[in-house]
Image (cartoon, helix red, strand yellow):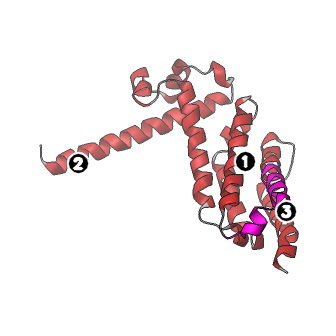
Amino acid sequence: MSDIEKKAGKKAEYRSALRSRKLIRDAYVALMQTKPIDKISVSDIVREADLNRGTFYAHYSNPMDVLMEIADGIFGAVQGFLTEFNFTNFLREPMPLLLRVEKLLADNYDFYRRINIHAASIGFTDQIKKILIEYISADKTVPEKIRSNAQFRIALELFAGGLISVYLGYVQGNIEVKPRQITETVAMLIRESASSLFK
C-alpha cells in the first residue's frame, strides 16, 4: 500500500469516526426529549443512532461521556468566541458577541431545552456563568482600578447571571419573544448601562 493510499485510508477512517460521534451525540439529544438523562442507556443510543454497540464503545465509555462531550463542546465554543472580543468594546457595542450567543443557542436549542429540565442543568449554567466571569475579570482592556472594584464584581455577577437567566427563560418558554428581540433588548440595556463609563 502506498503512502497516498494510507493517507486516504486514515482520512476516511477519521471522517467515519467524526460521523459516528455526531450520530451518537445527535441520538443522545433526541433521546433527551423523551427520557430522563439518567435513564438513557447505551442500547437506547445505538438504536436511535442506528449503530452497533462496538461503535459506541470505540468512542465513549458510557452515556454520561456523551453528555459531557456535548457540554464541553458548548463550553469551548463560549470560550472561543469570548477570546475574539474585549470587554470594553463589548460594553460599547454588545451586538457582535450577543449575536454569537444567539447563534450558539439556536445551534444547540434542543440540548438546552432538555438539559434545563434536569438537575444537571444547574452545573451546566453555573459553568457558563463561571466562564463569562473569569474571562471578563481577566480582560486587560478593563482598567485594573475598575476590575478590583467591589461594585464591578457585583455588576459582573449580575450581568453574567442575568444574561444566562434571560436566554434560559426563552429556552424554558417563560419569555415568549424571538431570540433576536432578546439580543437587541439586552444589547440596548448594556449600551445604556455602560454609557456612563465612557463619558
- First reached walking from the N terminus: tag 1 or tag 2: 2
The amino acid type, in three-letter code, at marker 1 is Lys
Residue at the spot of label 2: 7
Q: Secondary structure at mark 2?
A: helix
Residue 154 falls left or right of residue 124: right
The amino acid type, in three-letter code, at marker 3 is Thr
- 3 and 1 marks in contact (CB < 8 Å): no
- First reached walking from the N terminus: tag 2 or tag 3: 2
Residue 151 sits above or below residue 13 on the image: below
Picture quadrant where residue 79 is located: bottom right
**Residue 24 located within the stretch drawn in magenta:** no
Tell me the number on the disc at residue 129: 1
Residue at the spot of label 3: 185
Q: Which residues are magenta?
A: 141-162
Residue at 61%, 22% (x, y): give it: 40
Residue at 57%, 39% (x, y): give it: 70
Residue 98 sits above or below residue 3 on the image: below
- 1 and 2 marks in contact (CB < 8 Å): no
